[in-house]
Amino acid sequence: MAILDSLIPFKGRLGNIISYERNGRHCLRTVPETVRQTENTRRAAKVFGAASRKSALIRHAFAPELNIFPDKVLVNRLNSYILNAGRNNHAGLKNFRFNGYTGVEKFFGQQPVFAKDGRLRLPGYKLEAYGDAVRMEVKLIGTRIDFGTRTVTGTDTAVLNIALDESSQSFEGAEMSVDVPGKGTLLVVVQVRLFAADKFDIRDRKYFAADIVAVIEEQPQVTPLTKNTPRKQLTTAPAVPSRHAAPTQNGELLIQRE
């Protein structure tokens, strides 16, 4: 491994050299001439590739609405989170932090509760003093992702501002809601930012957070069963005994003698 010390660093492959960033430093390595893979390594590479694609889809889905600065190891953390949860375990994404240093529970004492009706309930609590912050912004982001087709089918947001001055140190709680109909899994993120008196957000990793607080799967549509009424069985009429006509000749009844 070599360290790249240049005014114009690059990332990616250039010939047989690969440049990448590790712990804030740009490093170089060469591409191996031959790669020997066993069945286990091929299987692991396939699983990791699927997790990486899912991670990129989630990051790109929330990027337009997130206002915080994620940490530098966000990609690796989210990939590991997905691998630990399982490829198809979407519910395992709950409680993931886009800012690995601070969680939402720091500002509320506990995680907000999101119900299936689209409402987020913020518990009441006693507000704390956060340095020079005079306002807390709470942003609710709901994004629905169809992981089967790898598409974002809808997004909705709601914003709540809470004053942090001395006259309102007791927060009675509040409700926020988002409405994101459509196909796919609904991921709900709560973002918290603190603002100073100059109306600029405090860009300190201790004073902002964004967590996935709920994962709601799409409810399958159930076709109502129609109740079939049994048909009445028709009873057949009793058979009429056949009658043999008496023999006749020239229209006259013949009397048979024994």
Image: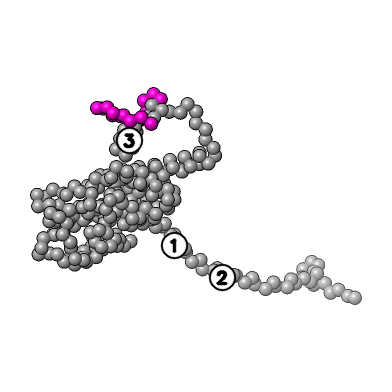
Mark sitting earlier along the chain (1/2): 1
Is disc 1 in contact with disc 2, using a CB cutoff of under 8 Å?
no
Mark sitting earlier along the chain (2/3): 3
Q: Secondary structure at mark 3?
A: strand
In the depicted view, which residue is nearer to us: 258 or 191? Answer: 191
Amino acid type of the residue that numbered disc 3 sits on in the rendered structure: Glu
Residue drawn at (30%, 35%) of the image:
25
**Disc number placed over residue 148 in the picture, else none:** none
Residue wearing tag 2 = 232
* Residue 181 location, quadrant: bottom left
Residue 67: x, y in percent?
22, 47
In the depicted view, which residue is nearer to us: 134 or 183? Answer: 134
Residue wearing tag 1 = 224
Residue drawn at (11%, 60%) of the image:
165
Instruction: Locate the N terminus and report the quarter of the image it occupies.
Output: top left
Residue 30: x, y in percent?
41, 28
Residue 105: x, y in percent?
27, 59
Q: Disc 3 versus disc 1: distance between alpha carbons?
A: 55 Å
Q: Is most of the magenta stretch helix, strand or loop?
A: loop
Magenta-tinted stretch: 1-16
Is 5 part of what is drawn in magenta?
A: yes
Q: Is residue 181 visible?
A: no
Q: Disc 1 versus disc 2: distance between alpha carbons?
A: 25 Å
Which mark is in front, 1 or 2? Answer: 1
In the image, residue 48 sits, relative to residue 19, either above or below, namely below
Instruction: Locate the C terminus and report the quarter of the image it occupies.
Output: bottom right
In the depicted view, which residue is nearer to us: 136 or 176? Answer: 136
Q: What colour scheme does the image use?
A: one colour
Amino acid type of the residue that numbered disc 1 sits on in the rendered structure: Pro
Q: Is residue 58 visible?
A: yes
Residue drawn at (28%, 62%) of the image:
110
The residue positioned farthest toward the bottom in the image shown: 258
